[in-house]
Image (cartoon, coloured by chain):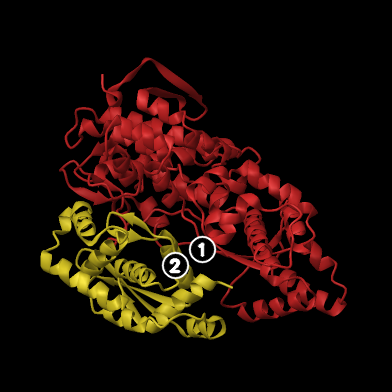
Chain colours: A yellow, B red
Amino acid sequence: MLTNHAKLMQFFAVANEVTGRKKLQKMIFILQKCHMPFEEKFAFHFYGPYSEELTLRVEELCNLGFIKEEKEDRSNYHQYHYTITEDGQAFLEQFKKDMPDFSQQVYAMKEKSSRFLELVATILYFDDLSLEESIAKVHTVKPKQKYTDEEIQEAISFIHAIRH
Amino acid sequence: MLYKNEQLHEEKVFKDPVHRYVHVRDRVIWDLIATPEFQRLRRIKQLGTTYLTFHGAEHSRFNHSLGVYEIVRRILTNFEGRPHWNKEERLLCLCAALLHDLGHGPFSHSFEKVFKLDHEHYTQQIILGNTKVNAILERAEKGFAQKVADVIAKTYQDQLVVSLISSQIDADRMDYLQRDAYFTGVSYGHFDMERILRVMRPMEDQVVIKETGMHAVEDYIMSRYQMYWQVYFHPVTRSAEVILCKILQRAKVLYHDSTYTFTLKPTHFKSFFAGNVKLEDYLKLDEGIVTYYFQLWQEEEDTILRDLCERFMNRRLFKYVEFNPNSQMNEWMELHKLFTDVHINPDYYLVVDSSSDLPYDFYRPGEEEERLPIHLLMPNGELRELSRQSDIVEAISGKKRTDHKLYYPHDLLENVSDPRKKKRMKEILIGQGEEKHVN
């Protein structure tokens, strides 16, 4: 029952707390690209890979009381925080799925900004292209982000580290 | 004259129940419509299993694709001469609109779920592969097929072009809402599209809506919300979809079971079952072929496959109850065991279906840049996100309604011989809430 929900719950259990919807989106996408069996379908959007299925599933987990969503008012926007609840833990105990350990990747991503994860996710989205082509594509689809060569190099090193 | 710019001697029109007429003047568009890959869309229903709930919903992806093309054509007519609009992108927009759903397969959603496929991947393959569609696009301009593929994949450099085909107020949604409302016969789904088209403005990297058109957009958002719950998330359609998925799942299991021999060999499904679907295999399958198999599989030896196909073909669907996976976790586990005990395989006959399993989306204000929202263009030139200006949109884009339903075959429960177990199963399923009959 709710296999894909259970997988996400395992992610929240490992992450402890996730700050930001955009960051959450990019983290799950990057984990997929690290061959973790999350099944949400992603498509490329204005801010990089995005999954409506993931958004809906997280809403379902919140409505079921398995995840707590807290809204924080910032100066000109809201920021959302997600944590697993006791009911969520109980659900996980019953329906935990056999998944590879992805804790190191999650800890590494938590340290990074959503801007950086957007870059990493975008490079990974084009991983069927050569590295040069995917970097060119990043500049094509993200001209406003103005990613520097240093940031791109850091993203490439990051990808290498979390995939190995 | 270059093929890319070639116009037909006279305009061709398709009669259309939603837009009255679909107008074609470009030779490239006319030729694309005539390709086998595009004609195949006639044999794929726009709404999958919805025809089992709303009998009028037999319209195809062909109808819808022409509709999206027509809406984009009208938008571009309005854009002519406006700042930010590059008229050189006109044919690209029209081709992308026409071809955006080219990779959809039969009962797309179920196939994608069971076989882990992605229709967008096949759209790219058809456009970029060795196909008639590709030949026409490349004849128009070398590298043009890649541009069309990029627009559809939303990775094209000009995001204004992308947003016409794919954004939270795009031609795709505007067509399917109206078309699906028309063919299902429901009274939701209608909004003043002409007004929206008149207030759309091209900006650097997106289409925005002139602030005076806000109420027309509110109407569109409300229509979208109502269509989701009244048509797209309809529990009876979901019951048919659950059975369809289970047929495919069962057939796949049997295919990999060396002890089982199909009476009707699943030739057209082989690559799907083997997880190696080539483009040519994909293009061969349409809904006519799929239902042909389902019709004949009603005579298979395997009782589960036979029963599921008989249910689908004769609309003998599963019943359902509302289900809360949190408060009813223990009941679910007990039911699972009871089903197993009485030899009703719960893998096929006890299914939880969630709203997130469906391929439709609500309006998202994109508070944290997870998604680009609809922007209103204010009189002072500022852009404001729609839900910040509209109370109606704010109300429906806040906390979302989600649901989970538990589907099961009521008739099989009636045949359970152990009275104690039968009573307990019914207590859990029917006792806890009103059982919904799928009529």
Q: Is residue B201 above or below residue B272?
A: above
Residue tagged 2: A59
Identify which residue, B385 or B125, lies in the foreground: B125
Q: Chain of mark 2?
A: A
**10 Å neighbourhood of mark 2: few (<14), some, or many (≥20)?**
many
What's the residue at 36%, 27% (across, down)?
B28
**Residue B429 x/y as whole percent:** 72, 70
Q: Chain of mark 1?
A: B
What's the residue at 87%, 76% (across, down)?
B419
**Residue B122 x/y as whole percent:** 44, 49
Identify which residue, B223 or B135, lies in the foreground: B135
Please report contact status of discs 2 and 1: CB closer than 8 Å, yes or no: yes
Give the residue type at disc 1.
Thr
Horizontal arrangement in the rendering, residue B250 relative to residue B142 (left or right):
right
Residue tagged 1: B402
**Residue B162 x/y as whole percent:** 30, 44
> Do badges 2 and 1 share one subunit?
no
Q: Is residue B235 above or below residue B132?
A: below
